[in-house]
Amino acid sequence: MLFEIQRDIFFDGLSKTVPIAEKRSPLPILSHVLLDAGEGQVSLTATDLEVGLQTIHESDVKETGRVTLPSRKALEIVRELPGGLVTIQSIGEGRIKIIASESVFELAGMDPADYPAWSAFEQIKPVTVEAEKLINMIEKTSFASSTDESRFNLNGVLFEWRDNRNRLVATDGHRLALMDGELGLSLESSVLVPKKSLNELRRILESVQGEISLGFEEKNLVVRTHRFTMTLRLIDGEYPDYTKVIPKSGDKILTADRMKLLQALKRVAVLTSDRNRGINMSVSAGRIELTATHQDLGTARDVVDVDYKDEEFSLIINVSYLIESLSVVDTETISMEYIKEGAPIVVRPHPVKDYFNLVMPMRK
Amino acid sequence: MNNAVQEPPSNPVEPRGRAVRYILHVDADAFFASVEQTLQPELRGKAVIVGGGDRGVVSAASYEARAFGVRSAMPTVEARRLCPHAIFLEPNFRAYKDYSRRMFAIMEEYSPMVEATSVDEGYVDLTGALRLHNAPPWEIAHRMLDRIRSTLEISVSGALAGSKTAAKMATRLAKPNGLLYLEPNRAWIILGRLPVHAVPGVGKRARQLLEQRGITTVADLAHTPPRLLRSLFGVWGEKLLQIARGNDSRPVRREPRGAQKSYSKDRTLAQDTLDYEFVRDMARKLAEKLAARVREDGQRAATVTFKVRYADFVDCSRSMTMWEPTNVNAEILDCIDRLFWKTVQPRRPIRQIGVKLSGVCSYGAQLNLFDSRHEIKERRDSAVDAIRQKYGFESIGASGDGNLPLPG
């Protein structure tokens, strides 16, 4: 195998793929990236068996072939190389040379035949989606999914197909976020995509504008452009029936300036502790009073003007949840709906859009 | 080894270069019995034994009862035989807690550096309070104990020394109702003469093992080669040596009042055992009792730790943290079951077990979207607690009791 590639292109490919390669894997080859030189192009592949990414780059391929490179070291080397052409050459016995003018590196690769098989996913009938639309739906929901590994079925975002629209739902059992949108991704049954993998997808899509194709196969969500293919392994688990916990509309609705409320929440949050993120929220006509008490340090109080005329109510709520919940709303004004004691608070953009989230309060 | 007093080895009570500290250990005498005698003055001067409870053992015996050989942790049957005329009382924990709180409140008036190690004993670091009181430390200690005695009308002892261990060991000598001051540099001349079981942590078994090797006093222990102690007691042996040598720089840890950080219980088995089913049942019982205390304090705990000490004094512990803090029996017992087989190694006789609930927080629990049964479980457990408090622990079965299969 022998090819030449621009340092900047090679670096870009490595910096996208290397973070995916497993850092501490029981399978050493997963800490390598696979280089596959074909006609006029080179692909880089990395996977941790949960997420896989293959990027494709133009290159002057003199001799086709496949090698693996220790991913971190390869990235470190190429980061330090000067701009210009880099030559990658396999020199036998699994050794690979990286040459850039006077700089020569020789690295030990592994047997590329041992690298996990990469399916071409040709049987998938993909749909075309605006990258931005997908990112938006992920951003509006994935924050609410759980990071507790013992609750693996809540570690993902649920993708559903309802009334010819796609619905994304995420919950960690304390809060829930839901968004309906037109991805055009018809599904026979709902699927669960891990939050961690979706974060990787977001990272990759940051540099992508325009359309991507999206498809599902039995165990993976496959996302593709002409520059890369990403596979996200689905979670095989039961999802709780979230429809049961979405409350019917109540009558106590307040609206508030999102930024003002968010800033006040961040201020009182200073006097909560990691152990206890609970703050007291008292709502009366025209105002919300927020108070926090830190056992050792002291107290905080803040008042925000809101549009509210109904009966007073108060509750204790995890301030971090509320901050995250308001942070994903993209309108200037938000609405908050109080149903009854012990029921979730409903946070929506105002005017209403096709997403909302729920936050369960804490016991008084 | 002999019993002659040896000059302490190159181990004065304060490690070189460190400033002298004044640590007062305060320990109420026969606390439960003492409180009962205050609440019911007609009991004063009489043999009072507080006990019964769930295991039928003596929780506390007044000094009048001790004169007949009654000791705490002795089966009540035995106590009755030794001292048939004694007045036996059911424990009244609420009152003891109240007296305990008042005792520590008095201690805190003299120095903020107060650490409660149990309901009736604790440490006060007076080092930083000398200037405030404009008095020597023994004077402050004397005033403090006198205040406790006159205000609460209970008997209390204490000792002032340069470290926690020295102070605690010296309190033994001060009891009952006394105060002892040990000058840091000479403390170990006296402490060295104490029997080896005066060292905190040395129980019946360790004492036996040490005495078999001629190590009968604290000074003997301080001169024992580290290798021998390590072979007898593992890592703990090294700690033991440091304690006996007076190398104890542990600070007095002030805790925010009323906020207990963890709840733990150890139980040394009557004899080393391979009966894991029995041990696991005991672990579950300890966990249930701790959970009841956590509930009573209106707290929740996130982390459960299970500890095993094998017959060879090797400790092994495992812990797990739950997704959210709880005080529900079923959830805590589930952790115990899961930890049990991760901790216990087959065919190794067990000597002692311990359970700890930590990550304690008092805030109202986060409500769940999907599971509303949590609250019901909590209420049910509290109801069980109430029954047990009235009729004893065994009066009602463990809730959520499901036996796991035991490996052959």
Image (cartoon, coloured by chain):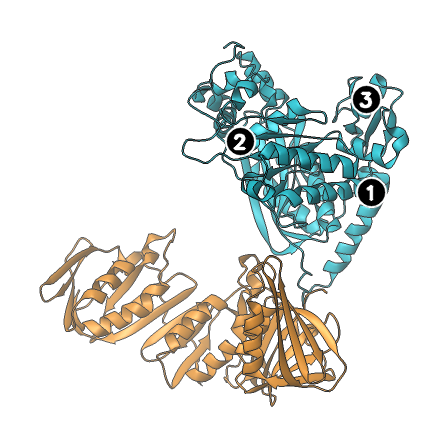
Chain colours: A orange, B cyan
Task: Provide the residue designation for mark 3.
Answer: B65
Mark 3 or mark 1: whose residue is earlier in sequence: 3
Q: What chain letter is assigned to the residue under label 3?
A: B
In screen coordinates, is A44 left or right of B217? left
Q: What chain letter is assigned to the residue under label 1?
A: B
Q: Nearer the viewer, mark 1 or mark 2?
A: 2
For the point 68% across and 80% down, the residue is A337
Few, some or many C-alpha atoms within 10 Å of disc 2 (few <14, some 14-19, many ≥20)? many
Disc marking residue B389: 1
User: Same chain, marks 1 and 2?
Assistant: yes
Q: Could you tell me residue B286's position as x and y percent? A: 69, 39
Few, some or many C-alpha atoms within 10 Å of disc 1 (few <14, some 14-19, many ≥20)? some
Q: Residue furthest bottom?
A: A351
For the C terminus of chain B, the image quarter is top right
User: Is disc 3 placed on a helix, strand or loop?
Assistant: helix
Q: Quadrant of residue B364?
A: bottom right
Q: Amino acid at mark 2?
A: Gly
